[in-house]
Amino acid sequence: MPEFEDDAEAGVITRTRPDKKVQRPRLYKVLMHNDDYTTRDFVVWVLQTIFRKSENEAVRVMLHVHHNGVGVAGLYTREVAETKIAKTERLARENEFPLKLTMEPEEDAD
């Protein structure tokens, strides 16, 4: 039940609301997978245009994916991650590349 405070001097009655904790939405890692056909230039371009990486960051992520087989393109809410994956894979298909992206939930920080 809310608490009421009476400020008789000002003629105002205020109500204190209980603190509500807003839970942050779960974040998802967008993972980019290496393949033998998608060019490095295309991957860097995608990272810059779709994932808003600087050129240096895009090259760093691309090289990580190339050498390790998979890398994180970004961390987003579920809907944003799904949209970026769909857009990237559509662009890859239009350019005849088999680039594959997946997503997985970020581990809880607790």
Image (cartoon, helix red, strand yellow):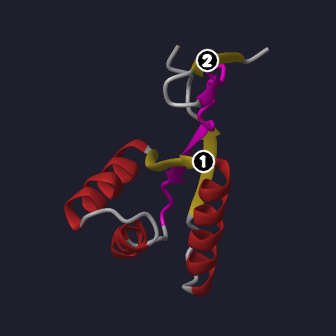
Q: Residue at x 64, y 77 (%)?
A: 90
Depth check, front residue: 38 or 6: 6
Q: Amino acid at mark 1?
A: Thr
Q: Quadrant of residue 43?
A: bottom left
In this picture, is 12 found above or below 73? Answer: above
Q: Quadrant of the N terminus?
A: top right
Residue 17 percent location from the top left of the image: 65, 24
Residue 20 percent location from the top left of the image: 65, 24
Q: Nearer the viewer, mark 2 or mark 1?
A: 2
Asked whether 21 falls inside the magenta stretch, the response is yes
Depth check, front residue: 47 or 40: 47
Q: Residue at x 66, y 19 (%)?
A: 18
Mark 2 or 1, nearer chain start = 2
Residue 73 percent location from the top left of the image: 44, 53
Residue picked out by circle 1: 77
Q: Residue at x 50, y 19 (%)?
A: 109
- Residue 88 disc label: none
Decide if residue 31 is on the left or right side of residue 85. Answer: left
Q: Which residues are magenta?
A: 12-36
Gap in angstroms between the C-alphas marked 2 and 1: 40 Å
Q: Secondary structure at mark 1?
A: strand
In this picture, is 90 found above or below 99? Answer: below
Q: Quadrant of residue 26?
A: top right
Asked whether 16 falls inside the magenta stretch, the response is yes
In this picture, is 95 found above or below 101? Answer: below
- Residue 5 disc label: 2
Residue 21 percent location from the top left of the image: 62, 24
Depth check, front residue: 66 or 24: 24
* Furthest residue toward left: 56
Q: Amino acid at mark 2?
A: Glu
Decide if residue 93 is on the left or right side of residue 33. Answer: right
Q: Secondary structure at mark 2?
A: strand
